[in-house]
């Protein structure tokens, strides 16, 4: 065996995991310590996660994040793979950009974590002309999205859905009606009124959620809905799934912990798109991940420099850095009784990998040896200094976190 991990807690049982040639050979109940084994000392073992919504910023914005630093944050956060959005500079609407991203990832981490490019749905993310999805798919793109800019034309979105499906990929739709001004920095409601700023209404999202559902149902083509933030959207998704719709949806940890009251004082670290909504929306999203109405979690990792975030609210960029905090926040949901420990595997591993047809660990013979050890008893305070991402822009700075990754293997190779 190339690797033996002894005394790991898997689904409540103490086990020994045997690995050879990058795959799991067998798992058996814990006995005596085998020679040369890695002693997990009773720590929990989880299958590695996939983040279906990451902004790596490279090429073009390496002062915010690089592919190497994003992957470093990912692997320390329990992720063996990140799906990277196309709003780079230049936009990932060409084979050259796709290849560049893959080469930079391989250069930084030859054995993983993996970078999975998401190609632009339309050229330049402008919503006017479809990208060459066939060429992008062949170059390595696993999905297509205009994230950050909704495809305004329903006819164009239909054409893109059909073409993407034809090349074996899905559209990840950013649901936002652009006729509501995008400069609105926070949710429309009591807090926007108190701060005296224009707010973004939750119907801006739900109108486009309804459109995506109708197109998917009409075409009988699946579509994935990004960063769901409102209770109205949850209701639409739940109703659609009861009818057998082919849609899937994600939400992010910040929508499960925060609401728009945190924007009091013009807090730019809490400025994200879509914006943090109300406590009612937060609770609806918590119910939705527990019930499966929302299929998976994603970080929407959007790193920025602190000097950019220190601008006035209307000028500061949208986005929260999320790879460093996602696992600990998810564990907090378990501690609060919002979800079960087993739901972590569903929300961060099974659902995302399955939806985008990517391999993952089942802890069965022959499955990839991509897994990590997690110590839930480690308590730590989130500071800019202990974040691995270049982006320190998160409203969770100063929060007490619970649990950390202590070791991580990808293809049976220890990467931390």
Image (cartoon, rainbow, N blue to C red):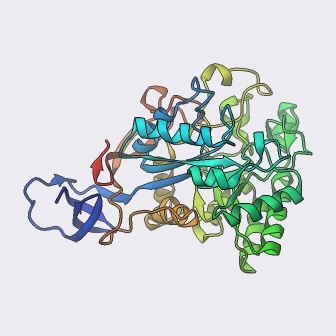
Identity of the residue drawn at 84% across and 34% down: 183
Where residue 185 appears, as percent x and y from the top left, is: 79, 35
Residue 170 placement (x, y as % from top left)? 67, 61
For residue 327, side relative to residue 291 (left or right): left
64 w.r.t. 91: above or below: above
Asked whether, in this view, residue 32 is left or right of residue 403, the answer is: left
Res. 185 visible in picture: yes
- In the rendered image, residue 61, in percent from the top left (x then y), is placed at 62, 27
Along the line of sight, the residue nearer the viewer: 128 or 362: 128
Q: Where in the figure is residue 355, as x and y percent of width and height?
A: 58, 65
Above or below, comparing residue 200 to residue 169 in the picture: above
* Residue extending furthest toward the bottom: 243
Q: Residue at x 83, y 31 (%)?
A: 195
Foreground pick, 398 / 186? 186
Q: Is residue 228 left or right of residue 292?
A: right
Relative side of 224 to 64, left or right:
right
- Reply above or below: 101 against 2: above
Q: Nearer the viewer, residue 89 or 342?
A: 89
Question: Which residue corresponds to the image point at 46% horizontal and 55% vertical from the top-left?
Answer: 49
The reply to whether residue 298 is in sight is no
Instruction: Judge whether 316 appears above or below 217 on screen.
Output: above
């Amino acid at each position: 065996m190339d690797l033996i991990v002894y005394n790991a807690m898997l689904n409540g049982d103490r086990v020994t995991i045997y690995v050879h040639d990058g795959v799991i050979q067998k798992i058996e109940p814990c006995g005596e310590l085998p020679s040369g084994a890695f002693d997990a000392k009773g720590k929990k073992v989880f299958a590695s996660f996939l983040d279906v919504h990451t902004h790596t910023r490279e090429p073009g914005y390496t002062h915010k994040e690089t592919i190497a630093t994003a992957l470093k944050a990912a692997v320390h956060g329990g992720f063996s793979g990140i799906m990277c959005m196309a709003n780079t500079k230049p936009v990932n609407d060409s084979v050259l950009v796709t290849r560049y991203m893959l080469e930079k990832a391989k250069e930084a981490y030859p054995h993983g974590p993996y970078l999975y490019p998401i190609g632009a749905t339309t050229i330049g993310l402008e919503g006017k002309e479809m990208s060459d999805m066939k060429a992008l798919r062949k170059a390595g793109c696993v999905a297509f999205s205009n994230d950050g800019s909704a495809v305004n034309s329903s006819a164009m979105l239909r054409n893109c859905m059909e073409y993407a499906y034809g090349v074996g990929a899905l559209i990840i739709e950013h649901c936002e009606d652009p006729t509501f001004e995008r400069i609105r920095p926070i949710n429309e409601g009591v807090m926007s009124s108190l701060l005296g700023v224009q707010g973004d209404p939750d119907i801006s999202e739900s109108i486009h959620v309804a459109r995506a559902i109708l197109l998917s149902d009409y075409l009988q083509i699946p579509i994935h809905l990004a960063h769901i933030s409102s209770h109205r959207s949850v209701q639409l998704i739940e109703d659609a799934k009861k009818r057998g719709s082919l849609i899937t949806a994600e939400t992010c940890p910040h929508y499960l912990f925060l609401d728009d009251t945190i924007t009091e004082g013009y807090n730019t670290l809490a400025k994200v798109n879509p914006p943090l909504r109300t406590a009612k929306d937060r609770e609806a999203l918590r119910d939705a991940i527990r019930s499966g109405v929302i299929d998976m979690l994603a970080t929407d990792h959007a790193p920025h420099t602190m000097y950019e975030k220190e601008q006035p609210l209307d000028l500061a960029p949208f986005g929260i850095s999320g790879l460093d905090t996602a696992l600990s926040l998810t564990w907090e949901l378990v501690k609060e009784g919002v979800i079960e420990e087993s739901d972590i595997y569903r929300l961060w591993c099974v659902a995302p990998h399955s939806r985008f047809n990517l391999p993952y660990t089942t802890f069965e013979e022959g499955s990839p040896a991509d897994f990590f050890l997690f110590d839930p008893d480690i308590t730590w305070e989130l500071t800019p200094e202990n974040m691995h991402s270049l982006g320190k822009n998160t409203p969770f700075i100063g929060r007490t976190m619970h649990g950390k990754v202590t070791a991580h293997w990808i293809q049976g190779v220890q990467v931390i």
